[in-house]
Amino acid sequence: MAFLELNALTKRFGPVTAVDRISFNVEQGSFVSLLGPSGCGKTTTLQMIAGFENVTSGKITLNGRDLAGVPARHRGLGIVFQSYALFMHMTTAENVSFGLEMRGVPGAERKIRVARALDLVHLSHLSDRYPRTMSGGQRQRVALARALVIEPELLLLDEPLSNLDAKLREEMQLELRRIQREAGVTTLMVTHDQAEALALSDRVVVLEKGQVQQEAAPFDVYETPHTAFVSSFIGKSNTLPATLVSGDASGSIVECAGVRLQAGATPLAAGPVQIAIRPERIEVVDDGAVLTGKVSERVFLGNQWLLTVATPVGNLLVLRRNAGRSEADIGDTVGLAFRRVDLRILASSEAAA
Ligand SMILES: Nc1ncnc2c1ncn2[C@@H]1O[C@H](COP(=O)(O)OP(=O)(O)OP(=O)(O)O)[C@@H](O)[C@H]1O
């Protein structure tokens, strides 16, 4: 039995089904992200686990315990929200200590546990400071220490880094992972940021319109997306409508805008499909081009160039590593090539509907 189990969890607000029969597991000690666009039901799912929102149907089991009817304060959870909601009139140490006081933990033990939690988040030197005198990243650490000091069975994070600027956010991602590992706490994080989910998680659960689209390790979600939605939501992807002419476990042939292309393996039957290829899997080549096209846009990203190439099958994004020399320019004709396995066949959304 998994540590946290969601079984056909459903939430309806009147006619709106916000969460639609969601099922997934979280193993003890692991870090799982619930990832999806705005309005897909992430926060509602988290709120049901936390006990802040009633469940319409389905079941949540934590460490073998059915959470139905268990009030939020008895669920043993640590929670960090997007706005850290620190007590502004309390110092760092007082903020962290508060939850222990509420639970009647004696003073001497409180002191030891607060010191340990502050040490974990590297904030021991700021224990007497007030939140208003601290940076966003430091406040975020206080919020984490406050959630962890009660030694929760499960840590719930709702967009915990989204108030931080880009650079700090990257730093805090690494910190969050270190803290989670050191504390050994089972963690479920809600985010709309795919890069954050990939960087932090052991497993990613991708949600769309209240339903689980895919649940897998970050590498697998990126490399083998199950649907066109997952393919385009996680990383950049060129996704085009096509017709599957023939295909099996060894490879396939597709037709896209009248052009026949070799593609990867597929279990799907001949008919309408979508094809998807990552921009970094397309090479610009002098010989052996699969497609030829004209560069219509060029963006310099520092470590990479992002080209848009108008080809007979449509516009394709092509990502090239910056090797310290100039890149094909707007108006240039370029040859493009890719491995057939990198051209993935996905069920067309019309066919799947
Ligand atoms: N209290 C409510 N009453 C009615 N509808 C609600 C309520 N809370 C959420 N919803 C609806 O449920 C759906 C899912 O909302 P939810 O907040 O869970 O999405 P989300 O994925 O967390 O989005 P975001 O990233 O924007 O917070 C949305 O259509 C939302 O409008």
Image: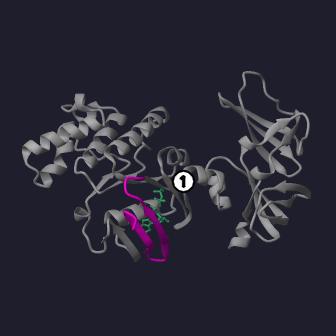
x 40%, y 37%: residue = 175
Give the image location of residue 318, x and y in percent: 76, 40
Residue span colored magenta: 1-30
Q: Nearer the viewer, residue 306 or 120?
A: 120
Which of the 4 quarters of the picture holds residue 90?
A: top left
Outermost top residue = 324
Instruction: Look at the image and tell me in which quarter the N terminus lies.
Output: bottom left
Q: Is residue 75 magenta?
A: no
Give the image location of residue 61, x and y in percent: 35, 69
Which of the 4 quarters of the picture holds residue 304?
A: top right
The dominant secondary structure in magenta is: strand
Residue 90 versus residue 225 in the image, above or below:
above
Q: Is residue 281 left or right of residue 99?
A: right
Q: Is residue 182 left or right of residue 234?
A: left
Q: Is residue 222 left or right of residue 84?
A: right
Instruction: Look at the image and tell me in which quarter the C terminus lies.
Output: bottom right
x 72%, y 21%: residue = 324
Residue 205 versus residue 123 in the image, above or below:
below
Query: Badge 1 is on which residue?
Result: 217
